[in-house]
Amino acid sequence: MSEQGYRVAVVGATGAVGTMMIKVLEERNFPVASIKALASSRSVGKKVPFRGKMITVEELTERSFDGVQLALFSAGATVSRRFAPMAARAGCVVVDNSSAFRMEPHIPLVVPEVNPNALQGHPGIIANPNCSTIQMVVALKPIQDAARIKRIVVTTFQAVSGTGQKAVFELEAQVQALLQGRPLPRAVYPHQIAFNCLPHIGAFLPTGYTEEEMKMVNETRKIFEDASIQVCATTVRVPVYYGHSESVAVETHQPLSVQEARDLLKKASGVVVVDDPAQNEYPMPLNAAGRDETFVGRLRKDFSVENGLVMWIVADNIRKGAATNAVQIAEILVKQGLLRVP
Amino acid sequence: MSEQGYRVAVVGATGAVGTMMIKVLEERNFPVASIKALASSRSVGKKVPFRGKMITVEELTERSFDGVQLALFSAGATVSRRFAPMAARAGCVVVDNSSAFRMEPHIPLVVPEVNPNALQGHPGIIANPNCSTIQMVVALKPIQDAARIKRIVVTTFQAVSGTGQKAVFELEAQVQALLQGRPLPRAVYPHQIAFNCLPHIGAFLPTGYTEEEMKMVNETRKIFEDASIQVCATTVRVPVYYGHSESVAVETHQPLSVQEARDLLKKASGVVVVDDPAQNEYPMPLNAAGRDETFVGRLRKDFSVENGLVMWIVADNIRKGAATNAVQIAEILVKQGLLRVP
């Protein structure tokens, strides 16, 4: 790399995740020589802050990646399918936050704490997993290494920010309307989300599962490189702004005591154990918001099965669930010399 | 019974459940000759409505049950432990909504749709199960009958009204304070509940489980009269006013297809199947509030285990989870001639 670092582009720079990607690049002092904020023509001219300056958003075009070495994409699967291969052909390495390439066999699907080696020999595009998968595999990595996972039963409590900035506004507007007795605004979700729970994230499939639920099944297997892991997922939207929570029952092939699991989790990369029930200490979305780590608590033995553990996993879905994980992938690319030298 | 019906007392008449018990007695046209609203001295003189009249709350004393044939208790375990045996000795039949007697072997623990026969030979006190248990066993009863349940993994999304009226006020006050930028009131829960999730209902036990979680384990076994049923529960408070939701993965001894389960659930007493994902139809706490049935949806095969089903169960925790179930028990007592004839 040059002394100044890499020429970086962020695609979808005005969205909830894109904005955070730029913020996290700055926070983690990623070696950025120049940064391009790219978005659709609708957002051209908007400004986003980076290192004390305001960057003007440019329109994403076929020529946007000329001379760019790293591009972080978070503008949806359609945009990624069209522009990520283009960027890769231009010699740029893409870390893509959409679902477009996650399950393609030759595309690495990476969580830095879990499978950094999958980056070796990447074809120019690397997929960032789904938010609800990332925090789960970070917490389960030491369990998988120590006792091999047989089956996971997971139920999620997912924040509205996972849907995007417009859903954050919708929850806030609904709460205000309810308090003031005004008619409820409703555009993002099919039902009121304020003071309600919607067991519906992503489209429904013929099996009755949602796309979000199947992401947790398929991505977990790919990241752990273990197709034998059984996953049953139920994903639910709750009236929380930031931070996904997950209730996880995990069954392992080998026995693992709660104390052993706790010790492993305390040493695990990216994990913070918050588990002192006597002091009312357990992970909560409110405390995880704005943090980059994955928080694990309510760790206990599952007495209902042989070799079972139960836990409660919380992380900021926009940070570790998206932007932070993408930037961490870029950091490893730099470290392992997998980014083109400028 | 006399032409006029029974002399009934409601203990804890000013609480969220007590108020609803009086309302449900009226709604279901329970044969009430006279009604006593009983509470602690603090509430004496307050008034509660019944059949278009206002009843003045009286202080609960040792003599409160003289001439009373049926008493519905919902004033906490301490009050029940002291006054329920007294009422029973006075010849009154007690339906107790507290946890005081639920696990006592000689006390029936009854959900009318599941184990009405447990009322036979009752000793004057009948226990109403915990809210989160009631709705789960109503939905699982046809599964248990058809395929025998081996293991249940349940995660709950519980409304603040389950904690009582003061928690309903706290959530509302917190939301208002947040919108107005005022300091947050916090008295009921150890942490902010607005826009947050607390994996903490009831006191923590040395195993790491909460009392609420163990109620779901122990009460389920007692109600189904099947100590072999394995239950792993995680109970979570969410910012919802009324209606508990439950994500339930159930493993059975015999195979049961989704279609068979659906057909059984459609015919099951007290159950309403709401399960048309293509039309965005699934149970939600917002729709269950104010209803007496248990709503089941998101029914699908659990591909992660042999003989597994997954579902989403929602009910009004103050109605079916407490008041309605207690009144339904009283209705069966009348029907089976198990109430003392006035």
Image (cartoon, coloured by chain):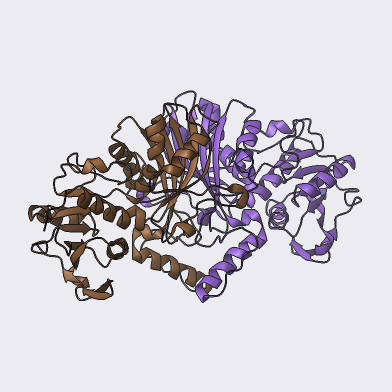
Chain colours: A brown, B purple
Q: Is residue B56 visible?
A: no
Q: Residue furthest toward the front?
A: A3
Q: Is residue B88 above or below residue B163?
A: above
Q: Is residue A215 left or right of residue A108?
A: right
For image coordinates 80% across by 49% down, the residue present is B79
Image position, residue A150 (x, y; %)? 40, 30
Q: Nearer the viewer, residue B25 or B194?
A: B194
Q: Is residue B166 left or right of residue A204?
A: right
Q: Is residue B161 left or right of residue A222?
A: right
Q: Is residue B27 left or right of residue B276?
A: right
Q: Is residue A236 visible?
A: yes
Q: Nearer the viewer, residue B232 or B2?
A: B232
For the C terminus of chain A, give its image quadrant: bottom left
Q: Nearer the viewer, residue B79 or A143?
A: A143
Q: Is residue B40 above or below residue A46?
A: above
Q: Nearer the viewer, residue B295 or A139?
A: A139
For the N terminus of chain A, give its image quadrant: bottom left
Image position, residue A257 (x, y; %)? 51, 32
